[in-house]
Structure formats: C-alpha cells, structure tokens
Amino acid sequence: MPIARRIDSGFPWSHDTYNGIGVASDGCVYYVLCSESFTRAGAMFRYDPRSDRAEFVADLSQACGESGGVPQNKSHVNFEEHAGKLYFATHVGIYSVVDGKEVMPVPPAGVAPYPGGHFLSYDLASGAIEDLAIAPGGEGVLTFALDGPRSRAYAITWPTGRLLAVNLDSREIRDHGRVSEMGEAGIGANYRTLCRSLRVDPGDGSVYFTTSEGWIFRLRLEADAFERVEGDDLRKDYFGLYDIASPGHMGYNWRQTIWYEPESAIYGVHGNSGYLFRFEPRIERVDVLSRLTSLPSQRCGMFDQFSYGYLGFALGPDGHTIHYLTGGPVFENGRRVAGKASTARGEAKGQENLHLVLYDIETGSYEDRGPVLFADGSRPSYVNSAAVAEEGRVYAISRVAPTADAISDLVVIEP
C-alpha cells in the first residue's frame, strides 16, 4: 500500500490545484499552490528532494507585473522544460457560481477585473521569471502545450475556449478563435466543457485537442485554422452517453494525454469512464485499450467519483510506464459509501480513496498498487496532478486534511 507524505510549503492560502507541477532536469519538483483570495495570488515553489525542503519561488501576480486587480490565483497547466527554462501559464482562481457552474468573478469595489492569463518562463540557472505574453480578452489559460524546438506555445483559454498560438521569439499571439461553441461561458445549447490537454506531435509540430462532441482537431504549424481529424473520433460506446451541452462532465473529451515517441502516438485517458486509449495521428485511428480505473471501481462498475475524471496521468522515467492517480470507492460495513449522483461542477461526488495505477505500454500490463494513505491513515483527496521523478517517486498536490476547507500541499508518494 503506497504511503504519502506531505511537504509543508508554508502557504496557508492554498486551495485545490489542477496540474501545476513538473520535475525539472535539476532534480527539483516545481509546483504552484493556488488561492481563492482577492488579496493573495497563487505561488510557485521548488522542492529539492536532496535537502527535503520546499522553497518559495514567486508570487504569480508579481511575476506578471500586476497588482491591485483580481490576482493570478493559479496555474492550471504543468511545467514544460526546454533549453534550461520551464514554461507555464497563469489562470484565474476565484469564481462566481451561477446555476451551479463557475463563471468569471465579480470583483469587490476597488478591485479591477481579471486581466487575463500570462505565459511565463523560469530560468533554472538564474531563477529569473520572464513575462512572455498575455491572453487576450481577459481570459485565463486553461490548457497549455510547448513546442520548444519551434519556439511555439499553444493554449485554450477559459471560459470561452479560444485557441492561441504564441511565437516565443516575437511574443506575437495568433488567435484561432473558439474551439467549441461558447465554451464554458455558454448557456444552454451553447455550453461546452473545454479540453484540458493539448498535445504536440514533435515530428511535424501539429497540435491536437478534442471537443465534448468527441471530435479530434489538429492545428498544423503556421496554419490559419484548425481542422477536424476525419479518420476517427472519441465518441465511443465504452465511454458512456453524454449531453454535450450540460456541465459537470468532460463529455467525449480526452482528460489527460502523453506523447509516446516509440509509436508516434498519443496515449490518453477519458474522464468519467477512465478508459485508456491510443490515438495514432499518422493513420488517424483510435484504439481503446483498457479500463485504467482502480480495481474497486471496476468491480463496482462505477464512473469516476471526480466528475471530470483525473489529470494525474504521467509517463514514468523508464519511458513506457504510465502512472495514474485515480479514485476508488470507500466502503463502510461492507457497503460502498454513496455520493452525489451528479454535479454541475468539476468536483468529487463523494468520499473516495486515491489509488496509484501503473500501466506498462510495452507489455500492456496493469497494476493497482492500492489505496494511497498518509501515515496517520487519512486519505489524500482532490488530487488532479502527477509528476514522476527518476527514482520512481510520484509527486502530486492534494488536500492534506479530510475537510472541504482544508489547504492543499505537495505530497510525495513512495514507489
């Protein structure tokens, strides 16, 4: 049974974090802790496993050169490294809730509206943070991908879902428009949950993403518009049936993906159903491979307890083992503890265990390592991040107490 250990970052404002993590070539873990405060931005930290210490790196708003408005409360994307620098982006982290779904916040008097998410780089040698560009229209950066060799970054914004291409040399942004109706700003028939994972084909620089309808789209390098992949899609019976215009689920979007170089393929997991699949861009084919959920979830026949599925899906240091942090039901007196039947937000429907699942791409073998617990027997929760270090340790960001208002922090899960 894996044991989790909290790394105390000393950030009492910390709230649930989605992605916001990465292991860099210097051996350190970089991560962002988010806030829900109009007066406190999110913060970037560095954890060095050699000294077993976490250090504050930067206030996100200050890194963006901002003060006095709605802060840069979070980063919703993982750190990606190229040529000695980490690249990432910022996002809004305070929301108003209308009809059960999150919308842009209405700031208090004297506080300027959210200015938009920033694209940033962090120099691993000097510690300098550079502000590269800002998303237009006051939108946050929900989804991010880096093509370092071509000096490009890509993003999907929130809430309307605009696809952006950023030239990192000229700092110019090309706005390719909305990817799916009005995105999560839509009402009724115009609502669509937005894709959380952009994936770059390192061979030709094409960028792939999905929509709630299950369509796979491609943006070719220097293209004027994105195009639908005609050969296949993600609208699979195995994934379930969805009203694509309703909130609270990912529809037929993929949830999280990785690029697997030996096959020039994208491996991904579908949120809600938890099925692992492979998409081969060259032949435009999707193969559904295996259900990657925990063994107790499989036995119960249940969907993910987290309404969007899980983002903690990462390739290990051997280059072929997927590490997946997923949920599992909790049992009391031999019966599963039930939760809410549905939710209009991205949230856990009820109490769950965190499981570490391994899947070897080369052999197709699956292993559920079992529930992850802290040493005192309490459960990590609201885990939607994962990074795997060379020694096999898995890092994630989790709530560190069993209450809804508990702060989140970095945890290390021993292999």
Image (cartoon, rainbow, N blue to C red):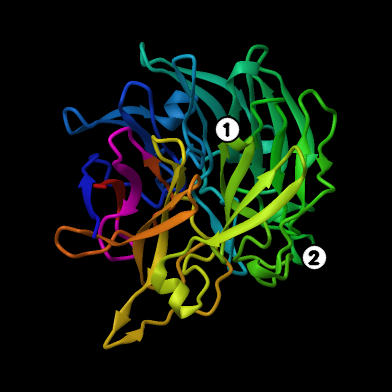
The image shows residue 57 at horizontal and vertical percentages of: 33, 26
Choose top left, top right, bottom left or bottom right for residue 266: top right
Under mark 1, the amino acid is Glu
The image shows residue 187 at horizontal and vertical percentages of: 74, 63
Choose top left, top right, bottom left or bottom right for residue 269: bottom right
Dot 1 or dot 2: first in sequence order is 2
Is residue 389 located in the magenta-colored stretch of the structure? yes
Q: Which residue is mark 1?
A: 261
Q: Which residues are magenta?
A: 388-406
Q: Which residue is mark 2?
A: 189
Seen in the image, is 12 located left or right of residue 236? left
Q: Please, which residue is most extreme toward the front here?
A: 363
Is most of the magenta stretch helix, strand or loop? loop
Under mark 2, the amino acid is Ala
Element class at badge 1: helix
As drawn, 373 above or below 5: below
